[in-house]
């Protein structure tokens, strides 16, 4: 399975052959792992061939888990035309779909906006004798309509699942908060948070990061700060995603003093900083014209074991160009193209500025 995820299919097949040559008798689990290695890495032909091989081995006939992985592979590769074939074969062998199978198909259809097929599969699931929709089903369908911004359908299905006795979880609420926030439906976003509070759902770091990011991108700095302060008051620890959203919003609004405040706060915390965070602060200081601070952060990345990426270079070059420092920008561009070690020497960025 691990070799399959790394797309080393030839090695995975060789290990299977070595196992056979050493007289080790394969089990259903071994064959199913091989099906997963082939299927999930894109080699559906070999995955189907392995299932056929299983049928000829005593006590190794494919079971529901084998077929579920095969169906997941088809869904991942958007080969929905093969799913009906798999379902028919399962029916012929007397193997009934379970929750995992149905949820996999529903999620696959939802991700490519095949809503009619998605709902038809849900209907089949409801009519089956051995399984019923659960929160995973609910989140797949709500997530599908959220992605397509079909909010009325999203809300309708939320109510439908509630009538079925399926209770939403934090993932459900976070998806709905994000969907409303992206289109500026702040009242509905707040109503979800109020509902969570009434039902004793404690907002997580994901919830707060979503709300902070939504208000930050909309330029609603006061509302963003309110939720950030509430988050800290409730003991929810900010992470790099939180700080990135704050810095991006402050930088865009020209509130560089607040970026300074975030930097002081981060320096006195145990938050593990990453490249996206440095990109945010480098961009903020670059836009504010504080090139000295921007260059200090560029160098500080190396000390924090964060490698600059194309965004880091682009933000810095834009700042140089904005101040007519075209030669420095060109040198930085050459450094990016040659993949030069940023931290090498006494002060690489300092040399660029000279």
Image (tube, helix red, strand yellow):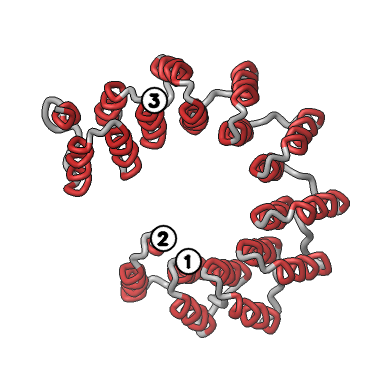
Q: Name the spot of residue 196 as percent of width and height, x first.
A: 76, 33
| Mark earlier in primary sequence (2, 3) | 2
For marks 2 and 1, give the CA distance: 7 Å
Q: Nearer the viewer, residue 259 or 71?
A: 259
Q: In which quarter of the image is residue 278?
A: top left
**Tag 2 and tag 1, C-beta contact below 8 Å:** yes
Identify the residue position indicated by label 2 in the image.
5
The secondary element bearing badge 1 is classed as helix
**Tag 2 and tag 3, C-beta contact below 8 Å:** no
Q: Residue at x 60, y 68 (%)?
A: 68
For marks 2 and 3, give the CA distance: 44 Å
The label on residue 40 is 1
Closest to the camera, between mark 1 and mark 3, is 3
Q: Which residue lies furthest to the right in this view?
A: 163
Q: Which of 339 and 101 is in front in this view?
A: 339
For label 2, the crowd category at 10 Å Cα-Cα, with few meaning under 14, some 14 to 19 and many 20 or more, is: some
**Tag 1 and tag 3, C-beta contact below 8 Å:** no
Identify the residue position indicated by label 3 in the image.
288
Q: Which residue lies furthest to the front in this view?
A: 324
| Mark earlier in primary sequence (1, 3) | 1
Q: Name the spot of residue 126 as percent of width and height, x first.
A: 82, 65
Closest to the camera, between mark 2 and mark 3, is 3
The label on residue 346 is none
């Amino acid at each position: 399975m691990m070799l399959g995820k790394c797309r080393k299919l030839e090695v995975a097949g060789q290990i299977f052959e070595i196992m056979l040559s050493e007289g080790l008798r394969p089990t259903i689990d071994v064959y199913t792992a091989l099906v997963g290695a082939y299927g999930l890495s894109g080699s559906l032909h070999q995955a189907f061939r392995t299932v056929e091989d299983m049928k000829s081995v005593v006590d190794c006939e494919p079971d529901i888990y084998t077929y579920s992985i095969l169906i997941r592979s088809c869904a991942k590769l958007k080969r929905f035309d093969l799913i009906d074939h798999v379902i028919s074969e399962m029916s012929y062998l007397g193997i009934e779909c379970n929750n995992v199978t149905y949820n996999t198909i529903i999620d696959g259809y939802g991700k490519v906006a095949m809503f009619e097929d998605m709902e038809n599969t849900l209907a089949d699931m409801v009519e089956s004798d051995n399984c019923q929709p659960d929160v995973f089903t609910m989140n797949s369908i709500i997530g599908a309509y959220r992605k397509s911004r079909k909010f009325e359908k999203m809300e309708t299905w939320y109510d439908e699942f509630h009538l079925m006795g399926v209770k939403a979880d934090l993932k459900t609420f976070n998806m709905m908060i994000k969907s409303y926030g992206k289109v500026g439906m702040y009242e509905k976003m707040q109503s979800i948070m109020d509902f969570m509070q009434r039902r004793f759902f404690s907002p997580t770091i994901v919830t707060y990061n979503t709300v902070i990011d939504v208000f930050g991108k909309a330029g609603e700095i006061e509302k963003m700060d309110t939720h950030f302060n509430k988050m800290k008051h409730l003991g929810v620890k900010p992470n790099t995603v939180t700080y990135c959203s704050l810095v991006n919003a402050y930088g865009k609004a020209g509130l560089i003093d607040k970026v300074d405040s975030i930097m002081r706060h981060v320096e006195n915390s145990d938050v593990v900083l990453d490249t996206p965070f440095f990109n945010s602060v480098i961009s903020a200081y670059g836009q504010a014209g504080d090139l000295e601070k921007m260059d200090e952060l560029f160098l500080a990345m190396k000390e924090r074991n964060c490698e600059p990426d194309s965004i880091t270079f682009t933000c810095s070059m834009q700042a140089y160009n904005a101040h007519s420092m075209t030669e420095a920008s060109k040198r930085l561009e050459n450094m990016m193209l040659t993949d030069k070690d940023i931290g090498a020497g006494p002060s690489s960025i300092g040399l660029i500025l000279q």
